[in-house]
Amino acid sequence: MPLPIAQRHAWSLAKTLMVCITLFRSGDAFGVMPSAEYDGDPVNVLAEYDPFG
């Protein structure tokens, strides 16, 4: 998905689930997932959304 859409989805997911969400790059696309489940290369992490911060 494009970066602006991934950023909106990441924040919405963090607020809905009340968990930290990681925004990461995968090739030429972007993805989001709960930070606790992300086990990819830390270099690919663009941001982490914390609903408590």
Image (cartoon, grey):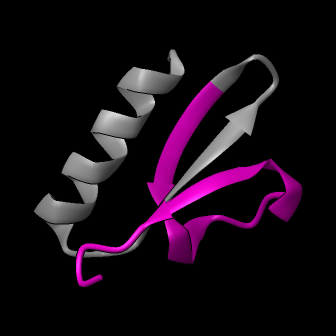
Q: In this view, does 34 lie to the left or right of 52?
A: right
In the visual, does 39 lie left or right of 41? left
Q: Nearer the viewer, residue 4 or 21?
A: 4
Residue 32 place in picture, x, y as percent: 49, 45
Give the residue at x 87% y 56%: 43
Residue 17 horizontal side relative to residue 38, left or right: left
Q: Is residue 22 above or below residue 19?
A: above
Quick one: quadrant of the C terminus? bottom left
Q: Which residue lies furthest to the front in this view?
A: 53
Q: Does residue 37 belong to the magenta stretch?
A: yes
| Left or right, residue 15 beside residue 23 | left
Q: What stretch is highlighted in magenta?
A: 30-53
Residue at image position (53%, 70%) is 35
Residue 38 against residue 4 in the figure, above or below? below
Query: Where in the figure is residue 16, as x and y percent of width and height?
Result: 12, 60
Please tell me which residue is depicted at 24% across the width and 73% down the height of the picture: 51
Is 33 drawn above or below residue 25 in the view shown? below
Would you identify the image quadrant in which residue 38 lies? bottom right
Which residue extends farthest bottom? Answer: 52
Q: Which residue is drawn at 30% across and 37% down?
A: 9
Q: Position of residue 36 (x, y in %)?
A: 53, 77
x and y, in percent, of residue 20 in the image: 39, 73
**How many discs appear?**
0
